[in-house]
Image (spheres, helix red, strand yellow):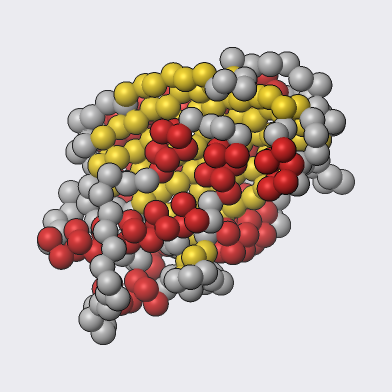
Amino acid sequence: MQREIKSASGLTKQTSQWFAGLQDSICQALERIDGKAKFKEDTWERPGGGGGRSRILEQGAIIEKGGVNFSAVFGEVSEKMQEKMGFPKAHFFATGVSIVLHPQNPWMPIIHMNVRYFDLSIGKAWFGGGIDLTPHYVAEEDARFFHQHLKQVCDKHDKSYYPEFKQWADDYFYIPHRQETRGIGGIFFDRLQPDAKHSWDDCWAFVQAVGEAFVPAYAHFAHQYSQKSFTEAQKQWQWLRRGRYVEFNLVYDQGTKFGLETDGRIESILMSLPQFASWQYNHQPSAGSPEAKTLQMLKKGINWAV
């Protein structure tokens, strides 16, 4: 699956092997948490080089639709990539894991994680990734738990990471045409590479820690909300919020754009979309309702980690 290139970091093989193992461990944990459904695996090869494993779980007890994807692809930087992403003419290698889970219960949040490594044959390489949460109903105690969890992960590696990457997530996971954030954010980072304070091993250790932070966070929300009762009206609100998620992923998400620009596998690229979503014309929740309060908290700059 992997083509050896002249790696800037020497981590091409190590990263792809670890990410493949991360996919295995997360899928096993999610099957235990869900207790009903099992992942279906679809292995694929990219015509230009490399391939991956797409794993999808549908109609589980907790997860309505979820995907945990691993890929390790390589090839020549296309003219589209040069134009759209500013890459030079070179060979590239990219590997990582991407996860999106859409729950059955409206009280459960949508969760997304991506951890990745990118290497160019001209001697440049970097890490990227992050975790973010999109609740259908924003509860302040949940937002505090989630952000404190991520802050602890960041602080073990560099205390400047959390405030920087939290702000980056606020700015990235934003829907300009709605003037609202996609959810309560989390952390997001890109082009992470060695500097005066951090070696390649330091950067790699941080990315591994982010990957390992996923299951504890999701298990917390599954334990808290998976059995909570809900109404049909709350289910309809969940579908409306999923519509916002779809809008962001199809219009703004850079991972989706990168997959399309590199002739990626379309089923894997669009696995982030929910099975059901809706768009209601000019929907306005009742003043003072939980739905209205949620919309009021979909904004940048909220300090949740207090």
Compared to residue 10, the image places residue 206 above or below, namely: below
The picture places residue 305, in percent across and down from the top left corner, at 52, 64
Q: Position of residue 5 (x, y in %)?
A: 76, 20
Q: Which quarter of the image is occupied by the N terminus?
A: top right
Q: Quadrant of residue 278?
A: bottom left
Point 46% across, 52% down: residue: 250
Using residue 291 as the reference point, say whether residue 55 is left or right of it: right
Residue at image location 60% in from the left, 39% down from the top: 261
Question: Residue shown at 32%/26% (left/top)?
Answer: 39
Q: Could you tell whether 238 is left or right of 260 in the image?
A: left
Residue 112 image position (x, y, % from top left): 45, 46
> For residue 16, what is the image quadrant?
top right
Of 93 and 264, nearer the camera is 264
Q: Is residue 189 visible?
A: yes
175 or 67: nearer the viewer: 175
Residue 120, picture quadrant? top right
Q: Judge from the rendering whether residue 282 lies leftward or rightward of residue 59; answer left or right.
A: right
* Residue at 51% from the left image edge and 48% from the top image edge: 131
Residue 192 in sight here: no
User: Could you say where residue 150 lies in the image, as x and y percent from the top left?
Assistant: 53, 51
Farthest residue in the front direction? Answer: 79
The answer to which of 12 and 155 lies nearer the viewer is 12
How many marks the image carries: the answer is: 0
Q: Residue furthest right?
A: 196
